[in-house]
Image: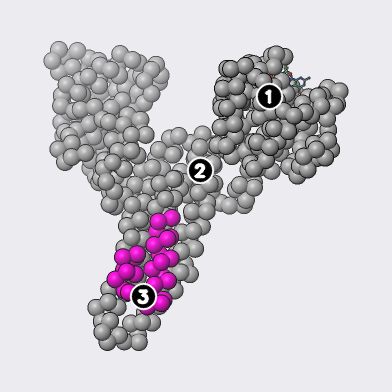
Amino acid sequence: MDNACRSETICAIATPIGIGGIGIIKISGPDALILLQKIFRPARATSIPPPSHKLIYGWIVDPKTGNLIDEVLASYMARPRSYTGEDVVEINCHSGYAVLRRILDLVLAHGARLARPGEFTLRAFWHGRLDLSQAEAVLDLIHARSDKALEAAGKQLRKGFGEQVLRWREDVLELEAQLEAFMDFSEDLEAEDASALEAVAHHVERNVLPALRRIVDRYEQARVLREGLSMVLVGKPNVGKSSLLNALVGQERAIVTPIAGTTRDVIEDGFLVGGVWVRVLDTAGIREKPDMIESLGIERTLRSVEEADVVVWIVDQSRPLDADDDRIEEKTRHKRRLVVLNKRDCPMETDAEDLRARYGLRDAIVPLCAHDPDDIERWKRFLETEVLEDIFLGLEPAFAVNARHKECLERAVTALERAVQAARTQGLPELVSEDVRAARAALEEILGLHVDDAVLDRIFARFCIGK
Ligand SMILES: Nc1nc2c(ncn2[C@@H]2O[C@H](COP(=O)(O)OP(=O)(O)O)[C@@H](O)[C@H]2O)c(=O)[nH]1
Ligand SMILES: [Mg+2]
């Protein structure tokens, strides 16, 4: 985005479009206040400019016709104490399709342009109100479906992670400075220079590197918080996969019939357990000799198995195990897997012992009836203790580290490991310096200190208009 773009005044409807209590039109940029003065008539005389950060009651008026459009509360937030760091105006109006549209059109007609997705937050980033990791946290916060995800995003937004990254960057800068000194005087190296260099290398190795690695290791956990835990239900046709999906999410999401091969596509829904969002995927049953459509479904099932965090293998305890079960067992063996013995209300043909004997299973095997709400509740608790606690194992909510941060952190770790090693072995100082600079650049990328526009565009395109 070029500089001309930055000086434009932008506007958008910031609330979901539709009928509701209130709708908010947001305006940000140098002309925000002038714009407000053109189309807003306060009910009582106010100072000019109006007081900042106060709600003012009045009317939106079309200056051309003098027609009153809506009764509103307007506010003006003088820069830099606003979300974007620019002059911001918000108009709280009634929420309806026509009202919001009319006011937005008026604002557009008086010199603002429509904001692009995420542009308000992008401006906050430009003006140093947020670092890039915080801007990403805004997005995570909006998309959070569970308390735990919300907590992690909130922590990130409050600058915890950004500040931590800044501290690491300081340490790396210190190492860089020591190396510079080392290079300048390498002709007649003083013993204290060498020991100063060693001290910084030691600090980086003892304190910085382990902390970076810990965050990288927690990435999985952060990902599960953000995206939800993905859990795929697999099994032969008719074992009750769709019934289990419906029972877990509490609504008739998938079609259930006694006819084998009903579900042919992957169906997804989700539910909350232990403060975590679980995405469940119901799949086509795996069996030999399916028809053409069903076999495409089975291919999808196998793909979902590969992508899932947890596989739930459902066995119908009223039928004997057969070659189809053998195939499913084999295809899911390498995954974190839970086994469910469904239809425990029916006469038993297969029990946990049969499964253990036939496959040498060590997985937890839980008998249940997909139609019994108590069984479903019990199984959810089991999921919480067996799977979720295992993933989150007593950890306090991590920062909302995303794939981009993880990639930067990994680069920083590799570069720093090399740098520390080289500093120790008195390698060529120039090379050590290069590694240290690479580590610093990787950390700075997390904060968005030097990122190119393509990266910014990719991040902000995920926002909605008006944020
Ligand atoms: N008795 C009994 N029937 C079940 C149970 N779970 C599913 N069913 C029935 O088994 C049939 C197949 O279920 P469905 O969920 O479509 O299986 P899918 O093919 O694996 O998705 C349907 O008639 C269900 O009502 C259960 O726990 N007990
Ligand atoms: Mg089904």
Q: Is residue 194 magenta?
A: no
Quadrant in which ligand 1 is drawn: top right
* Mark 2 or mark 1, whichever is nearer to me: 1
Q: What's the residue at 35%, 55% (across, down)?
A: 442
Q: Residue at x 41, y 70 (%)?
A: 420
Residue 131, compared with residue 288, is above or below; it is below
Of discs 1 and 3, which sits in the foreground?
Answer: 1
Question: What x and y, as percent, mark residue 5?
Answer: 18, 36
Say if the magenta span includes residue 415.
yes
Q: Secondary structure at mark 2?
A: helix
Residue 388 location in percent, x, y? 63, 43
Label 1 sits on a secondary structure element that is loop
Q: Residue at x 63, y 41 (%)?
A: 335
The residue at label 2 has a CB less than 8 Å from ligand 2: no
In this rendering, the answer to whether 87 lies above or below 219 is above
Q: Would you identify the image quadrant in which residue 304 lies?
A: top right
Spatial CA distance of label 1 from label 3 is 61 Å
- Residue bearing mark 1: 287
- The residue type indicated by label 3 comes to Gly
Q: Which mark is residue 223?
A: 2
Query: In this picture, which residue range is highlighted in magenta?
Result: 410-436
Report the Cα–Cα distance between label 2 and label 1: 33 Å
- The amino acid type, in three-letter code, at marker 2 is Arg
Kindly identify which residue carries mark 3. Answer: 427
Mark 1 CB in 8 Å range of ligand 1?
A: no
Q: Residue at x 46, y 69 (%)?
A: 205
Is residue 359 shown left or right of residue 421? right
The answer to whether residue 56 of the structure is visible from this angle is: no
Considering the numbered disc 3 on the image, is that residue within a helix, a strand or a loop? loop
